[in-house]
Amino acid sequence: MKTTSAAIKLVIFVALTSLATGVLAMTITNMRFAESRSYKAIISDVAGLLDKDDVRVAGVRVGQVDKIELTKDHQAKVTFSLNKDGVFRAGLPASTNVQVRYRNLMGQRYLALTEGPGAPNQYLPRNGVIPVTQTKPALDLTVLFNGFRPLFRALEPDDVNKLSFQIVQVLQGEGGTVNSLLSHVASLTSTLANRDQVIGQVIGNLNNVLGTIDARHSEVNQLVTDLRGFVSGVADDRKAIFDSVAAINDLSGTTADLLRDGRPAINNDIRGLNTLAKTLNANSGELDRGLKRTPGLLEGLTNISSYGSWFNMYICGLDARVRLPGGPVYQTPAIVNENARCK
């Protein structure tokens, strides 16, 4: 009976685990079982767009990107599919506009479909192509923010802070308008009358920036929203950040103690090195002569050990001196080897 109960529990556990795993896999892979229709769009730049990315209408997911290809004229052809049972049950209107938009600050993107001018009852066939005139690439944030670079280089830090604060206020809708922003820029650039080239470059870049902001206001709002979420995440993790700062403080104290304990030994080493340097300097002549003789001595040692990793000794001459206790010193005649190697 106990075995049967345990088996039933095991079967139920395996079934629930398999179901949860399947749901998780479907969520991660965006797996769909509904029937869909495929369409294509020609876009000039799809940097950051990947397969399986969302296709959305008014922020609601209605399909996904299936494939991205490069055309002969160096443009991107994006194949995407839409759920047949959704808002496009009758088909995709031929006047639909396609735009690549930022999904979050991590760089993920998605395709946004919007209604364009034209007859609403004209639909694209299956695998129909949306021309490049009805598509837009993603916003280039680098161009957006680099437009202010010449101005930031020329202004004082306080002026840069004021201008940046007003730009943020305008983008967040927290007061001020584009006209007030331009007025503030004009008041700042009035102090740079002797820098005509810089002012001209600033105004040109500023026009590009403001035009981009006006055309991409929804993306800028999303950027600010995501940035607010990032700052909130940092605020939530402030305890861990403060703990890390405390650990760094402990490490600094330990390092200071180590240096304090080792300072006497280091001082002794430095004094010994100073004494050695003075000794070498005082005996520089003998040291120089010794260094000059070293190559010859090393050459002789090399010849001795030239037959292998041992010293090969060859006797070229021999004599002996013997002192008897209480007597004179007797010296034997010198025996000299006349071999060529001894000459």
Image (cartoon, rainbow, N blue to C red):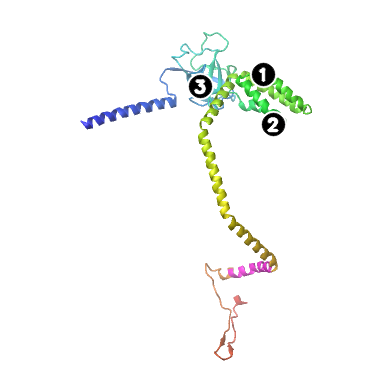
Q: Quadrant of residue 155?
A: top right
From the image, tell me which residue sits under label 2. 157
Q: Assign a secondary structure to mark 1.
A: helix
Q: Amino acid type of disc 3?
A: Thr
- The answer to which of 299 and 138 lies nearer the viewer is 138
Tally the numbered discs.
Answer: 3
Residue 189, quarter of picture: top right
Q: Identify the main secondary structure in magenta.
A: helix
Badge 1 or badge 2: first in the primary sequence? 2
- For residue 178, the mark is 1
Per the rendering, the mark at residue 79 is 3
Calculate the distance from the C-alpha at mark 1 to the C-alpha at mark 2. 22 Å
Name the one closer to the observer, 52 or 323: 323
Which of these two is toward me, 329 or 318? Answer: 329
**299, above or below 167, in the image:** below
Does residue 106 appear in this view? Answer: no
Task: State which region is magenta.
Answer: 286-301
Q: Are discs 2 and 3 less than 8 Å apart at CB?
A: no
**Which of the 4 quarters of the picture holds residue 74?**
top right
Residue 271 locus on image (x, y percent): 63, 60
Query: Is 295 in the magenta?
Result: yes
Residue type highlighted by circle 2: Pro
